[in-house]
Image: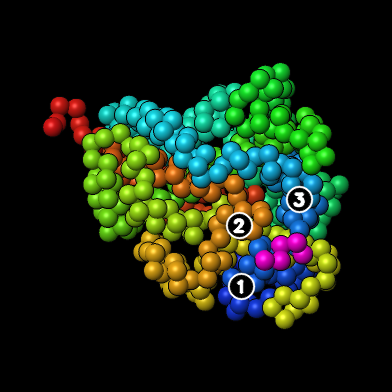
Amino acid sequence: MLPGLARDPVRALLGFGERAAGEVVRLNLGSFRPYLVTDPAHVQQVLGDRADNFGRAGDGPFWGPLRRLFGDGILSDGPAWSDSRRILQPLFTARRVEAMMGGIAETIADAVAELDVPARAGSPVDIGAEQARIVCRAMMKALFADRISVSDALRVIEAQDAIATSVIPRVLVPFVPLSLPMPGDRTFRDAVRRIDEVLVPIVRSARATAAHGGDDIISTLWRGTTDDGRPLDERQVRNDTVAMVAVTTETTINVLTWLWPHLERSPEVAARLQEEIDQVVGGDRVGPEHLPQLRYTRMVLDELIRLYPVAWLAPRQVIRSVSLGGVELEEGATLLVSPLITQRLERYWERPEVFDPDRFAPDRVRARHRYAFFPFGGGPHQCLGMHLFYLEAQLIVANVLSRYRLRVRSSRLPTMQLAAALRTKDRVELELRPAHPVGVA
């Protein structure tokens, strides 16, 4: 199976999933032989109902390489993860996120409005780069109290992009020990150094003021304690700060990049989306009050993240011997659980390759197994920022489409790149023009 993975990893993985036909199967990747889990009922057992039997395995084939960046904390497992999750979870409850939406909506509207300059000049824009700017401005203000500037956040994201691609050789050849040099290792080390140069001084300076209040992520971490009452040490606050910058930005930036080519290729979807936004928003600035009415916009986002789940792989390690789907799994075995595979299998989705937001109409959602769609994971490790993603992405899409009419310079869909997080391999350029030119009623 290794040659297929090397030639076209996405096609190979989907082929493995189709051939598995819903069974728990073992992949022969030489000395590395993980089990592939694709059936939603089995996924529910691994991520949800029996999650205690399946750990993230910080030294495993996927998390091991990334642990060199994120360390122990919110993206690990065990006591460090438990402490970080308990400390950070109150910042991401539905009530708390909705309370932030007024400020986030204002920030996004102002950031999107800066596209007026290229729109009036007729200059194309790299929409991925513009989305990064918009998302960073909103998230650094709402979640980090502007402790991290937008320019610094963009430097961190650039370094994280380098890290995401530099670990590909280790993810695809997971049996090579970390002690042996591999292509991408130097890029990885350089990128981690750049991230620490930006974030570690910010983390340290926040320590002095955290005791006096502040509900931003870094202050909250400094005030947090372990289960036995000890304050978090600087390393864990650093680890969680790095992780939270990543998880609160990359999903929105990456997923929305695929939206615009799909709208160009699906004019009926584009027209329906535009009609909803025009009716709901009208000539107003997009605000939190509009979001509950943007139902089709939410369906479009669901369909996007079905096709392009940024967290495309959720490997687990068997903590104690267990049976799954009639297969006896030995202690220490690796399981590969992938929303990218399950969410594109014909066994669970009709015409899965087609971009069809209507598959997320309420009646069709109720008819599906809940773990046929799990782009944010599930169970105790479900992503904290799921609710925030949908609201933020709706605001960005509604602001762009209420303010501009756009054309994609190439309607070809960007190539998927299987990195630490799924991303586009190609730039997407848009030509914008004002929807309401100056002087036109």
Q: Residue 371: x and y, percent?
A: 56, 66
Q: Residue 181: x and y, percent?
A: 82, 46
Label 2 sits on residue: 377
The residues colored magenta run 49-53
Q: How packed is label 1: few (under 14 Cα within 10 Å), some, or many (20 or more)?
A: some
How would you classify the magenta stretch by its main secondary structure? helix
Q: Residue furthest right?
A: 179
Horizontal relation, residue 21 to residue 233: left or right: left
Q: Secondary structure at mark 2?
A: loop
**Residue at the location (72% across, 36% down)?**
239
**Residue at the location (59% across, 70% down)?**
40
Label of residue 77 in the image = 3
Label 1 sits on residue: 41
Q: Secondary structure at mark 1?
A: helix
| Quarter in which the N terminus is drawn | bottom right
**187 or 253, which lies in front?**
253
Answer yes or no: do the residues labelled 3 and 2 have beta carbons within 8 Å?
A: no
Answer with mark 3 or mark 2, whichever residue precedes in sequence: 3
Horizontal relation, residue 115 to residue 425: left or right: left
The amino acid type, in three-letter code, at marker 2 is Gly
**130 or 201, which lies in front?**
201
Answer with mark 2 or mark 1, whichever residue precedes in sequence: 1
Q: Residue furthest left?
A: 441
